[in-house]
Image (cartoon, rainbow, N blue to C red):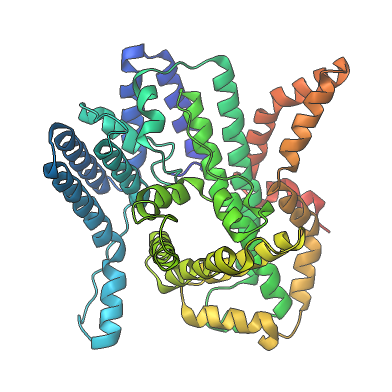
Amino acid sequence: MVFSSLLFVFLFLPLNLIFYHFAKPKNKNMVQLVFSLIFYSWGGPRYLLLLLGDTFLSWFFALQIERSEGSARKGWLIGECVSILGILGIFKYTGFFLSNLQALTGFPENIPQIVLPIGISFYTFQLLSYVIDVYREEVEAQPKFWKLLLYSSLFHQCIAGPIVRYETVANEIDHRHVTRTDLFMGIRRFSIGLAKKAILANSCASVADTLLPVGTDGLAGQSTLGLWMGVLFYMLQIYLDFSAYSDMAIGMGRMVGFHYLENFDYPYIANSVQDFWRRWHISLSTFFRDYVYIPLGGSRCSSLKIVRNMAVVWFLTGMWHGASWNYILWGLYYLAFLLLERFVIKGRIPAGLNHLYAMIVVYFGWVIFKFENMADLGTVLKGMFGFAGGGFTSMEVSTLFAGNVFFLIFAIIAVTPFGKWLRRYVFELGKKNQAVFTAASVVEAVTPAVLLVLAALSLIGDSYNPFLYFQF
């Protein structure tokens, strides 16, 4: 079950909210826990045991750390890291390492096919951050296992992020209150995320998949302009997709009194690669900063050690995203530009050009990120620079562009803060003009319902996609 399914939107989530808001205060957490476990087990009940096991280990180790002193505390922390990172490694990287070993040595003859459990990367990092924070005495260990399980399994964020720190919700697990404003703003944020996913991200994905077909042969036959346009749509899709899930998670959390931190801050308006990573997947960036980069020494050391620290972080960042060489290459690609900015560029690129530079770097970063097959990646990069088998352009590409030009413009606007700025401007104007205030209030009130209807129609079928009416 995913957030952008009709089953979730019109059955699971409404039932959750009804049960939650009619439950007695002492039972509200249990309602959330039951619904979260049902949600997680939907994709495979056997993996629920893994979630329970990881949470139990983290609960146990955190309690032992809190009760211990001296070197024993560090021993329990090492036990936590080895245990849950080892479990993550087995499920996520066994096939990757064995396939590379097989390519080098011919051994083993058969590689086991291990299915990656849903959300294991997210809840592993959440539990790891919780135990480390207990070790640092920044939070108190949770004495009740089921409450820590509530934290690790909350269906709002356990499968697609953001990576929620325990300290963010520790107090709200036991003390939270939902106002009408919270409920409305949560529904509004969820509706925006759902529409962003169902209408914008899915439409971008459809165009990107058409222009960037699976397989080296299909990519080799695509035109140069088709490849450039396909990557542009993919660039829009991946932000709209990821940020939509964060929007929906933040909205659902607020509906029941949890206040998750923002995870995206309009990264495509960044003026440097470093600025991009301050705005993109903030919860992941801050995780690696706080639990890897700073403990290694951060920036308070020699230049050589700074390079080492950054290299470790970006190698791990690439590995976290997937068990494939292209993700490692993607992490090292960003490492190169971040080092360049830190030691060579140092903010010298003029205003305006700095944004163009950042977006070019990000654009080609998504090329590396998308293609796990190195042959496909090489084919696309060659084709983008004029060595495409399909020539510069084609009738298919021209027709596809003409049919989606208005949608493309709208999608580009949607990844900027223009809508946020316009909403703020209208309400500021409304303070001086009653008619404007009334109109803005009506629009604000009906926006969630309108977005839900449009998203539902888009999910039912492309024939109901509202952007089709703007195509030639």
At horizontal 22% and vertical 78% (from top left) the residue drawn is 110
Q: In the rendered image, which quarter is residue 213 located in?
A: bottom right
Q: Tell me the residue at 34%/19% (across/down).
A: 174
Q: Quadrant of the C terminus?
A: bottom right
- Relative side of 281 to 137, left or right: right
Q: Residue furthest top?
A: 24
- Residue 30, position as x, y percentages in the image: 30, 23
Q: Tell me residue 20's x, y (percent).
A: 41, 20
Q: Closer to the camera, 128 or 56?
A: 128
Quadrant where the N terminus is found in the figure: top left
Above or below 22: residue 124: below
Left/right placement of residue 165 relative to residue 436 reads left
Residue 438 seen in render: yes
Percent of width and height locating residue 190: 57, 34
Residue at the (55%, 21%) spot, across then down = 182
In the image, residue 8 sits, relative to residue 367, either above or below, namely above
Query: How many circles with numbers are drawn on the protein?
Result: 0
261 or 326, which lies in front?
261
Residue 285 appears left or right of 461:
left
Nearer the observer, 41 or 149? 149
Q: Position of residue 470 (x, y in %)?
A: 81, 51
Residue 4 visible in the current orientation:
no
Q: Which image quadrant for residue 378?
A: bottom right
